[in-house]
Image (cartoon, grey):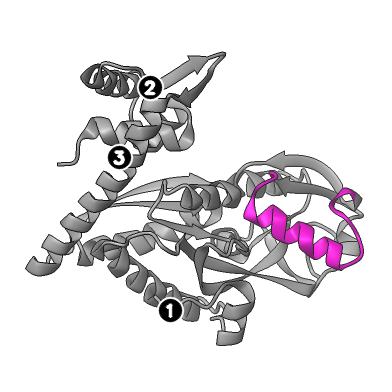
Amino acid sequence: MADRRLQVFHTVSKVMSFTKAAETLHMTQPAVTFQVKQLEDSFNTRLFDRTHNKISLTEAGKVVYEYADKILEYYDKMNNEVRELTGEVAGSLVIGASTTIAEYMLPSLLGAFKKEFADVSIRLQVGNTDAIVSMVENNMVDLGVVEAPVHNKNLEVHVCRLDEMQLICPPNHPLANRDKVSIEEIRKYPYISREEGSGSRSVIDKYIREQGLSYSDLNLVLELGSPESVKMAVESGVGLAIVSRTTINKELQLGTLKGIPLDPPIKRPFSHVRQKHKFRHRAVGELLDFAVEYCTQKAIEGGFEVPTDEQKKFYGNNVNY
């Protein structure tokens, strides 16, 4: 019911890119451009200055953006209050998730949620942890789910479970039969890394520095952008890697990889992240409550560590939704 032209303009204004707005809205770039052009025609003025492949808001555009922000927020509030009166849980949610969580945790969680709340439509945005946190900060997603500590005090962070990182190697590797392994031993072999900005990469980098070394001390031979590509490279004998234990269940069962705990161990939080002061409609609240309970249950079933209150304070800001 909210003016689609206003929604598209608002998204372009937040990301300052027609291309990125098209990706966010799952539209083609010409369609985004058309919607903005229609809004400009209705006001009979330009809302964006376009120079040297960059855009900026005109003075009129700044005015429209300020009002659009309020109009869309009030629309969400109106929609939510009416649904509260009718007892209906419905609407659209945009979830942002870092790669590991999107591939290995969210499909089953969202599937279970949809069975209970069939009238809620969910769109998933996938990126590395830095990208998802940025989306939350810029109001591009209703909820982020990430795999590394988040230190922005303007965000609510709720730690749902702790994940262990393990070394993976082929079954015939010299380290394959070890009960645990140190970074000092790992650096003797070719190493495969995730890309910069990845939650896994930042957690491992911090861990290595705590051991008195740096990431450059590793024998880095390859950087890859997803857990699946990392595992395939390790299976092919290209090198070793440190990955989430969550990602290797299938390979351990098939015997194509060995998972070895690190000494000392690496533990990292899986967390729900949202803006502190953003209006939350009922569907978001239901999803948060459902996700917290679901993640705790699955962590127990899978033998993962459920965070204590002290660990929640350490990794997040101990928010109670």
Farthest left residue?
86
Q: Residue at x 63, y 55 (%)?
A: 199
Crowding near pointer 1: few (<14 within 10 Å), some, many (20+)? few
Of residues 70 and 302, the one nearer the viewer is 70
Instruction: Give the number of the disc on residue 320.
Output: 1
Secondary element type, mark 3: helix
Q: Residue at x 41, y 74 (%)?
A: 292
Spatial CA distance of label 1 from label 2 is 40 Å
Secondary element type, mark 2: helix
Nearest-to-viewer mark from 1 and 3:
3
Q: x and y percent of residue 278 in the render?
A: 38, 59
Q: Quadrant of residue 29?
A: top left
Q: How many marks?
A: 3
In the figure, is residue 28 to the left or right of 264? left
Q: Residue at x 47, y 76 (%)?
A: 319
Crowding near pointer 3: few (<14 within 10 Å), some, many (20+)? some
Upstream in the sequence, badge 2 or badge 3? 2
Query: What's under tag 2, amino acid-wise?
Result: Gln
Q: Which residue is mark 3?
A: 68
Query: What's under tag 1, amino acid-wise?
Result: Asn
Query: What's under tag 3, amino acid-wise?
Result: Ala
Nearest-to-viewer mark from 1 and 2:
1
Q: Which residue is mark 2?
A: 29
Nearest-to-viewer mark from 2 and 3:
3
Q: Is residue 256 above or below residue 63?
A: below
Q: x and y percent of residue 63 in the render?
A: 35, 34
In the figure, is residue 51 to the left or right of 232? left
Q: Quadrant of residue 68?
A: top left
> Does the magenta-highlighted stretch encompass residue 210?
yes
